[in-house]
Image (cartoon, rainbow, N blue to C red):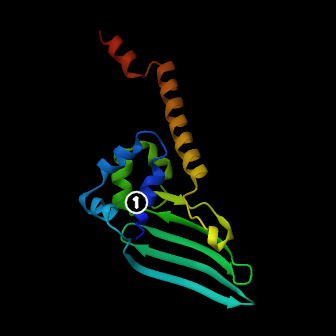
Amino acid sequence: GINALRIFLNSLSIVPELQDKIERSLSDKYKVIAQGENTRFNNIELDVTVQNGQLNLTKAQVLADSFYLEGSGAYDFWEERVKVQAGVSLPKDLSFSLVEAIPELSPLLNQNEEIFLPMAPYDGHIKEIVILPDIAYLTKKIVIGRGKQELENLIDKALGNDESSQQNQGQ
């Protein structure tokens, strides 16, 4: 079976040492889901049209036990080509526990305070389809978030607002 939560969490672990933090931050509910064999889907809504040998998926919304997916795509029956774009959001409670344990993930929060990760767009033969998180987006968001934090630390240090300066002044 396919466990979508496990795949999603593994994609977040591209940053060194995150895998252990991710696993420790999961509530019992999400640990059980992540260790399961399959993803449980609660609701699936698809807007599909078929015309001239092509299936067009104008809207796909999938609500599962541990994520929400929204996307679109197309399939050409004659050329056996598929085109897919999608994004995944984690529930607020799971997003909160992950960000609390791993502040580096906070740049991935969307306006609904859910961790959001787009999937890498795919345009190719159906037999070669691979749906993976957009690692470039993930890396960029996390690196920019870390860089921002480092810059804030340097500014604080330059202004004498870091903890060591405050401790030295107190002595």
User: Which residue shows up at 55% across the image and 40% down it?
Assistant: 143
Mark yes or no: residue 161 visible. yes
Q: In which quarter of the image is residue 47?
A: bottom right
Q: Position of residue 33 (x, y in %)?
A: 31, 65
Q: Which residue lies furthest to the bottom in this view?
A: 51
User: Which residue shows up at 63% across the image and 67% down it?
Assistant: 128
Mark yes or no: residue 114 visible. no
Read off the residue under disc 1: 6
User: Which residue shows up at 73% across the image and 88% down it?
Assistant: 53
The residue nearer to you, when weighing 167 against 71, is 71
Q: Which residue lies furthest to the left in this view?
A: 28
Q: In which quarter of the image is residue 1?
A: bottom left
Q: In terms of secondary structure, where does tag 1 sit? A: helix
Q: Position of residue 124 (x, y in %)?
A: 69, 68
The residue nearer to you, when weighing 37 against 100, is 37
User: How many numbered badges does the structure rendering display?
Assistant: 1
The residue nearer to you, when weighing 51 against 148, is 51
Depicted 163 relative to depicted 54: above or below = above
Say few, some or many: other residues with alpha carbon within 10 Å of mark 1 (under 14 / 14 to 19 / 20 or more): many
Quadrant of the snapshot with the C terminus: top left
The residue nearer to you, when weighing 113 against 37, is 37
Q: In which quarter of the image is residue 123?
A: bottom right
Depicted 51 relative to depicted 24: above or below = below
Q: Position of residue 136 (x, y in %)?
A: 61, 50
Depicted 148 relative to depicted 118: above or below = above
User: Which residue shows up at 29% across the image and 48% down it?
Assistant: 24
Q: Which residue lies furthest to the top in this view?
A: 171
Q: Position of residue 45 (x, y in %)?
A: 50, 83
The amino acid on which the numbered mark 1 sits, given as a three-letter code, is Arg
